[in-house]
Image (cartoon, rainbow, N blue to C red):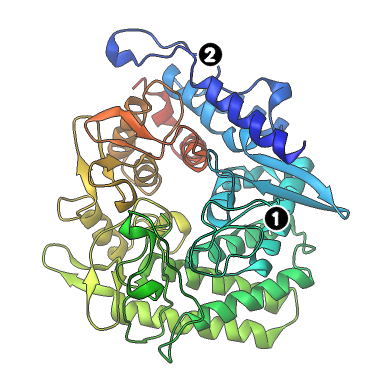
Amino acid sequence: MKRRNFIKQSGMLVSGAFLAPTILTATGKQIDFRSMRPVADKRCFTSKSVDKLISKVKTNMADKELAWMFENCFPNTLDTTVDFEYIDGKPDTFVITGDIDAMWLRDSTAQVWPYMPLIKKDKELQELIKGLVFRQTKCILLDPYANAFYKDVTKISKWKSDKTQMLPGIHERKWEIDSLCYAVRLANEYYQITGDISVFDDDWQEAARLIIQTFKAEQRKDGTSPYTFNRTTGQMLDSPVHWGLGRPVHPNGLICSMFRPSDDATLFPYLIPSNVFAVLSLRQMAHIHATILNNQPFADECNNLADEVKEAIEQYAVAEHMDFGEIYAYEIDGFGNKVFMDDANVPSLMSLAYLGAHKPNDGLYKRTRAFLLSKHNPYFLKGNAAEGQASPHTGQDNIWPMGIILRAMTSTDDDEIVKCLKMLKETHAGTGFMHESFHKDDATKYTRDWFAWANTLFGELIVKLNEERPHLLKINL
């Protein structure tokens, strides 16, 4: 499909879907449970294994509304955001985030992540994921500091006036540690499932070297960085302070991130969830280079950097909270200043168990999680519509469905999970889809109609429950 038609068609289909007559049962009227998916021949990519899984899981779900939401959300990435083709004989997959015509390294990995367990038996889906690994590698080689890209390098970004190096093909150049981590996460998981080492070609290895080079540069041990960013907008979170350099840090081995996964500027440059994520990614790169690529020196370099970052996290990022004991700070500066909060985007402190950095019952994680779900966290909101984690990205009144989903995915308590499912069911505003955020007192006031990451993450939660706690799906909420 031509890129132009892909965007136009996907956008029209999704926009049209939202116009279908659906009304929340809270109003006393019944929802029309017609599928909100594009018709079969209008979907961007079709996977028989995904469709088969949807049918299987739906039969185990007692709540019709929740099952309808699952059917709409789980395939949303494949239905509406994927541009797949072969370029020079290699698969190439470009995945837009939804209503923004660009591909984020973070979002694109997260959007396809729930489909990963299916790729070993679904060769077409495997090719799709392989193509995304190749596409992400191209993006990193273009600019490891950029977070979002275009497939059409002639497309002019709305952010072309940003005061940073805007190369052709870049939508946005916000330096976020997690962007590079997500690319490693995808390639590693693809290999772990399929055993296919062809993704670790010369380009991927060059990208790996760029990742290490960038991480080390952003440790800023000499007080400098090759990266600056400044944007002229009315939103102060759109740029780091001090003319794009960010606040001062006292070098301690941690890696600076000028932006959070929300694309908001950090308060203090040492963003702890992203540094924890970096340790995981560095270990994965080390294993790949040691066991597959026969490059022990580079593997050692990755492990040594991981050790350094891990030790710094343990020494500087864990602090005594007056009500919760030792917990993670969200951001620090190395001078002793810390901010205690969280942001609903992943990586977050809440998501550390989801990402595999902690077990749900680890003491440090449990204490941190308890803080995150308390009144002491300035971005944990309670309202008439729901309670949940928020983000400075959407202000002081909006809860993120993604935060509610991650709360459920990291919970070991059935009652808490059911509570989260009820809130998700009650706050989709009759659309059958997740949104970026909604007002804590009125879920009909929401941001982003078409946010594929949140949709497929919700689907991932339902699949996880079907596998691990199927009794919860037998409940009619």
372 sits to left or right of 355:
left
Q: Which quadrant holds residue 235?
A: bottom left
Earlier residue among tags 2 and 1:
2
SS of the residue at dot 1? loop
Callout 2 touching callout 1 (CB < 8 Å):
no
Disc 1 marks a residue whose amino acid type is: Val
Q: Which residue is mark 2?
A: 34
Residue at 47% across, 35% down: 462
- Residue closer to the observer: 212 or 83: 83
Task: Please determine whether, in this image, residue 260 is positioned above or below residue 30.
Answer: below
Check residue 40 in the rendering and tell me which mark sits there, or answer none: none
Q: Position of residue 123 (x, y in %)?
A: 79, 43
Looking at this view, name the residue that lies furthest to the top: 29
Circle 1 packing at 10 Å, graded few (<14), some (14-19), many (20+), is few
Give the number of callouts. Answer: 2
SS of the residue at dot 2? loop
Q: Position of residue 89 (x, y in %)?
A: 88, 53
Looking at this view, name the residue that lies furthest to the right: 89
Task: Please determine whether, in this image, residue 53 is positioned above or below residue 209.
Answer: above
Q: Is residue 246 visible?
A: no
Residue at 72% across, 83% down: 295
Q: Position of residue 97 (x, y in %)?
A: 55, 44
* Mark 2–mark 1 distance (CA, rounded to whole Å): 39 Å
97 sits to left or right of 139:
left
Q: Quadrant of the C terminus?
A: top left
Residue at 51% across, 60% down: 161
Q: Nearer the viewer, mark 2 or mark 1?
A: 1
Q: Quadrant of the N terminus?
A: top right
Q: Which residue is mark 1?
A: 153
Looking at this view, name the residue that lies furthest to the left: 322
- Residue closer to the observer: 430 or 363: 430
Disc 2 marks a residue whose amino acid type is: Arg
